[in-house]
Image (cartoon, grey):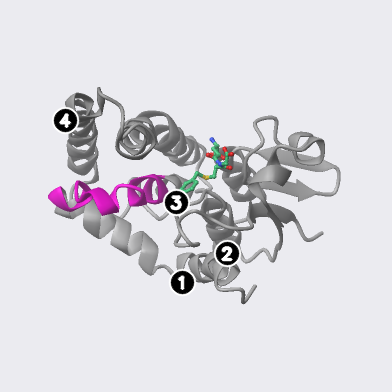
Amino acid sequence: MTPTITAFERSPDGGRGLARDLRVRWALEEVGQPYDVRLVSFAAMKQPAHLALHPFGQIPTYEEGDLALFESGAIVLYVAERHAGLLPDDANARVRAIAWMFAAVNTVEPPIMELVIVRILEGDKPWAAGRLPLVVDRIRNRLQQLSVRLGDADWLDGAFSAGDLMMVHALLRLRPSGVLDEFPTLAAYVARGEARPAYQRAFAAQLAVASGAA
Ligand code: GTB
């Protein structure tokens, strides 16, 4: 059965990879699973039909038969567990890859989201200028630790996994700030993720929505 995911009808970034349906598209592309996309407006996301799928009125969602899922990490894990290619066979390596998925959304991404909040959503608030350096320092601290762990490896733990997929996408959000480029090892890691053919297909499909080609 072909799953259906939801994505922004009109993404604030013009479909340039930042909205989180990109993670789901990327995972589906990595495992070769075709999918359909239902585009939703910001207004429609807050209506009962979408809230039944996603309690917080957001994208992405994932529907397949009787199953409806929300949370990009949960969706990527579901896809990774049902298809070969995103999680190792070895039980210990598999749970380590899942640990990296959690690290991406629970340890690395939160300070990155704080930066988005302080720069964009609260940029005009009186506290923003004072808070900004504190937030950037927290990010630098995490990136330093991550880059030490990655070392000169291509991926976080052996072969590319769903953990790398989630981590690369979380880090991508940082690129416009310039902070990612302070860590050449991580900038190269993100570039390796973006160079994967599955990422390229996912990115092109998201961008096609904004350009009216989808
Ligand atoms: N934890 C959830 C997950 O990982 O699935 C978070 C989902 C989420 O934040 N969804 C956002 C959303 O639906 C889109 S991805 N927002 C609408 C709303 O809350 O009303 C976050 C996002 C949005 C836009 C950009 N951008 O354009 O730069 C980047 C990222």
Nearest to N terminus: mark 1 or mark 2: 2
Reading the image, the residue beneath label 4 is 133
**Image height of 28 relative to 43, above or below:** below
**Disc 1 target residue:** 197
Residue drawn where x is 78% and y is 61% of the image:
2
Label 2, secondary structure: give it: helix
Residue 133 location, x and y as percent? 16, 30
Label 2 vs label 4: CA separation? 38 Å
Say whether mark 4 is within 8 Å of ligand 1: no
Position of 214 relative to 170 (above/below)? below
Front tag of 4 and 3: 4
Between discs 1 and 4, the one toward the N terminus: 4
**Is the residue at mark 2 in contact range of ligand 1, meaning its CB lies under 8 Å from it?**
no
Tags 3 and 1 touching, CB below 8 Å: no
* Residue beneath the point at 67% across and 51% down: 41
Q: Are marks 4 and 3 in contact (CB under 8 Å)?
A: no
Q: Position of residue 157 (x, y in %)?
A: 35, 45
According to the picture, the residue beneath numbered tag 3 turns out to be 165
The segment highlighted magenta reads: 167-182
The three-letter amino acid code for the residue at tag 4 is Pro
Q: Earlier in the sequence, mark 3 or mark 2?
A: 2
Q: Earlier in the sequence, mark 4 or mark 3?
A: 4
Residue 171 lies in the magenta stretch:
yes
Residue type at numbered disc 3: Leu
